[in-house]
Amino acid sequence: MAFCVLPLLLASCKTNEPRENTCVLHVLVNLPDSCKLSYESITIEDRNMGTTYRISGGVSVGDTCLAYYSSLPVGFYDMTFNATVQVSEDYSYALRAYNQNVTVKDTTYLTMQAFVLPKSNDFVIAEVFFAGTQTPQGKNYIGDKYFVLVNNSDSLLFADGIVLVESKFKNTKKFTVTPDIMSSAMAVDAIYRVPGDGTDFPVKPGGTFLIADNAMDHRTVNENSFDLSDASVEWYDVSTNATVTDIDNPDVPNMEKIYCYTLTIWVPNNQGNTTFAIGRMPKDLTDEQYLQDYRYDYDYINVTQAGTFEMSASAYRFPNAWIIDAVNMCPHSDYQWLSVHESLDAGFAYVGETGSDKTRFGKSVRRKQGDDGKLIDTNNSSDDFLMSQTADPHFWHK
């Protein structure tokens, strides 16, 4: 019904008149509650041309809706609504709404539902190093991948039970999937958990927790790598292939392997086109129950140069409610969609322009730090991370 009043609001909205070869766009944003906004805007990113537009000055429709009007060229767009609610002089919170791959042609009407972004009071993923390094001879070296978690709260936290997962879907390949579970769960096919009884891995406020592939001093075999022998934990795989084996440091605890798609060793995707997340599983849920009850069988349409094919596959569901933090990774120019719900991460981070970009080796993504010393966590990796940083697993100790 609110769209019926939009023509009456056009003169009040900040926009340009429609131009030749452009289409009229009407956007209605539903707010979660009546609130006083100190800032609001919609960022519109052209999926094909790489152009970014921004519209603001939304007109109130009742107490909990904002209406926007603009004109855009025909195309496909990602649209993000951001707003700040100022509750008092010293307290505010953020709202966001997100729509992917919106087709704009003729007159287009779009409704977006805004949600409250939770403030970070837990562990966050501070750095992701997935690309690996290269030896002085130019050969790829992969055993030195790592994740750095930081306690972004003001209290002592324990990393015991933290689960690290990698997405089943790639952010470089969009599928039409049935059933679509994205609003409630993340499709994953690598699941590793930090061991412990609940108090084995204390992390002070601002402290770090280093998860390594192989917890060793990699400089002994590759001078372009790092010393990961002081890692908090490492993931270790018992391979079924005698020619592809893992390295176990007996002085560093191994993560508990709940499931992984490979029968050899897990190597996080080195093109950086998947999503990584950390979370916690219910304490009373056994691994056997999880693998039995959370299997995700789905059908999808695979469009290739050879034709369009109906296919089936399987993974595991990791409920969004269990997820503490997620980071979408995608080469800058290869982005197609986000493989997790926008409430978990509405953007993506990258270290290369394309998946084959050789400059990605030795580079990581590193979370930004705010003026208050806390790491920035708006659930939008495009804004929260510094891209293509020189990887350094000990950066946070300096």
Image (cartoon, rainbow, N blue to C red):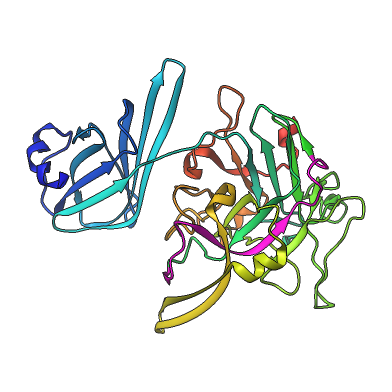
Question: Which residue shows up at 42% across the image and 33% down it?
Answer: 94
In the rendered view, tell whether residue 33 sits above or below residue 358: above
- Residue 229 at what x, y percent from top left? 86, 47
All told, the count of numbered labels is: 0
Q: What is the magenta range?
A: 175-201
Question: Which residue shows up at 23% across the image and 37% down it?
Answer: 66
Q: Is residue 194 magenta?
A: yes
Residue 56 falls left or right of residue 189: left
Furthest-right residue in view? 250
Quarter of the image holding residue 366?
top right
- Residue 217 at what x, y percent from top left? 86, 49
Q: Nearer the viewer, residue 114 or 288?
A: 288
Furthest-top residue in view? 89
Q: Nearer the viewer, residue 393 or 219?
A: 393
Quarter of the image holding residue 397?
top right
Quarter of the image holding residue 108?
bottom left
Q: Nearer the viewer, residue 362 or 183?
A: 183
- Residue 272 at what x, y percent from top left? 58, 57
Question: Which residue shows up at 36% across the image and 33% down it?
Answer: 83
In the rendered view, tell whether residue 252 sits above or below residue 62: below
Q: Is residue 198 magenta?
A: yes
Residue 244 falls left or right of residue 68: right
Furthest-front residue in view? 284
Question: Which residue shows up at 85% across the image and 77% down it?
Answer: 242
- Residue 158 at what x, y percent from top left? 75, 39
Q: Quadrant of the C terminus?
A: top right
